[in-house]
Image (cartoon, rainbow, N blue to C red):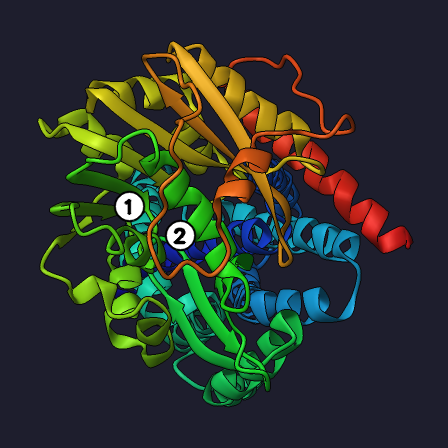
Amino acid sequence: MKVKYSLSLAVFIAGLCSIVYELLISATASYFIGDSITQFSILIGIYLFSMGIGAYLSKYFKNKPIHYFIYTELLLGIIGGLSIPILYFIFVTFPISVLQWSCYTVMLTIGLLTGMEVPLLTFAFDSNNYKNFLSNILSLDYIGGLIATLLFPFVLLPFLGLFESSLIFGIINIALGIWVCFCISKKLNFISLAGLISILFLAILLSFSNHLLKNWEEKIYKNPIILNKQSPYQKIVLTENNEKDVKLFLNRQLQFSSKDEYRYHEMLVHIPLLWVPKAEKILVLGGGENLATRELLKHPNIKQIDVVDIDNAMFDVSKKNAEIVNINNKAAFNPKVHLIAEDAFLYLKNTKESYDLIIADLPDPSNDILARLYSKQFYLLVKKNLKKEGVFVTQSCDVYFTNKTFNCIVNTLGNVFQSTKPYQTFVPSFGNWGFTLAADYPLEMPKNIELAENLSYLDASLVQSSFHFPKDIPLQKTKINSLDNPFIIDYFLEEWKQWKENANSE
């Protein structure tokens, strides 16, 4: 009876560990390769397929099912525990295609071993108890999976990160195998000794995890890292080189470089204010580092600035990190500024506030979560919260290398608002960057171009020229991006892939 209860608990823990490995590998692939929908879909498919193969193969191990279950747990612990460190190493060392196939191979192996777990345990009991025991085993396995899916976003990712989580659960998995072995044989044997050595190895890696991660990530980001933080929503990294150039990365994507960010933020903020010079109430969507806020505070007539960012960790960085506080001129501390940690889509849906100007300072639409913030439905919510004479502006990606993405944003806005007016400028760290104005009245160029004082880049002549697009940057028709048809993801990923292929061939 004690053995039965021990094995039931073992299935619960095994189910938990296996789902954690699946989530860790899928998240790592999404971070390093991008296109989270494709990565999660394919890797989950491989995991389920290989579980079926593992369940089928388990019938060839009926003669000693408990022993093979122990071997399975030890192998799962070693492979699952080392999976993320190995994938990190491959990403730093080899081409991205090698990483992609490595993710598939590791997931296939973990799925095969996971698929063998439940059948092996059911083989261990006589036919009289088979049905009841099978139902108990399956229920515990599924409950373990549920616990894993709750632990991953709320505990593992924000507090441990991917690297340490894989090592810790590898140790738990191996310890489970040793425990089951001891419950059966009542003594430590060769298998238990091998398991203890494996645990020791993983524990040593865990103790050096910070050092390993620091070395690998500095190779990834190519500059010394001054902040490395995993929030429930994203990985936040700040780097600083010898020239005091501070760069912000979110999930490895560059968000700004302090040497030229003023170009981007002056264009984003001061140009739309030409159409609403008496604006008093502003909404910034994204921009948790408060650099757009810094520019808005150059206009004394503005009385209220609401900054909505889903990640409260970004607000902490904007107020507590010395380098960012210096760059944003302590904008986050200004009494006019209200920091709201909420999803931009939900905030617009639920708020009763209306604004003179709404600014979308959001990351590029590289995944389904971000693509919804460039959808027709999102822009309808923006329109709902704009005053009658209000203006909306959004960053619109690189106008040259991601031209379809840029035009998709312009065209989707044009499907919602009466008038749109795209413009662009050159930002050395990014290229020719696009922006789009939108309003429910004709956006005629203001006769008097009066800009705020103390600007580092923007002047009246640049305002005029920014609305002119060269012949090789076409304004073309595209599909309209919506929640149920997020075409912008396909445009962006296709163009980004093409850009990387061209860059690698040079």
Q: Residue at x 48, y 84 (%)?
A: 210
Q: Position of residue 348 (x, y in %)?
A: 21, 29
Mark 2: few, some, or many residues within 10 Å (few <14, many ≥20)? many
Residue 195 in view (yes/no): no
| Gap in angstroms between the C-alphas marked 2 and 1 | 8 Å
Question: What secondary structure is found at the residue carrying circle 1?
Answer: helix
Please report contact status of discs 2 and 1: CB closer than 8 Å, yes or no: yes
- Quarter of the rendering occupied by the C terminus: bottom right
Left-right relation of 406 to 280: right
Disc assigned to residue 143: 1
Residue 353 in view (yes/no): yes
Residue tagged 2: 15
Please report whichever mark, 2 or 1, sits nearer to the chain's N-terminal start.
Answer: 2
Q: Residue at x 31, y 26 (%)?
A: 391
Left-right relation of 113 to 372: right
Q: In this view, which residue lies farthest toward the front?
A: 448
Residue toward you, 477 or 123 = 477
Q: Residue at x 58, y 48 (%)?
A: 111
- Quarter of the rendering occupied by the N terminus: bottom left
Mark 1: few, some, or many residues within 10 Å (few <14, many ≥20)? some
Residue toward you, 186 or 108 = 108
Amino acid of disc 1: Ile
Amino acid of disc 2: Gly
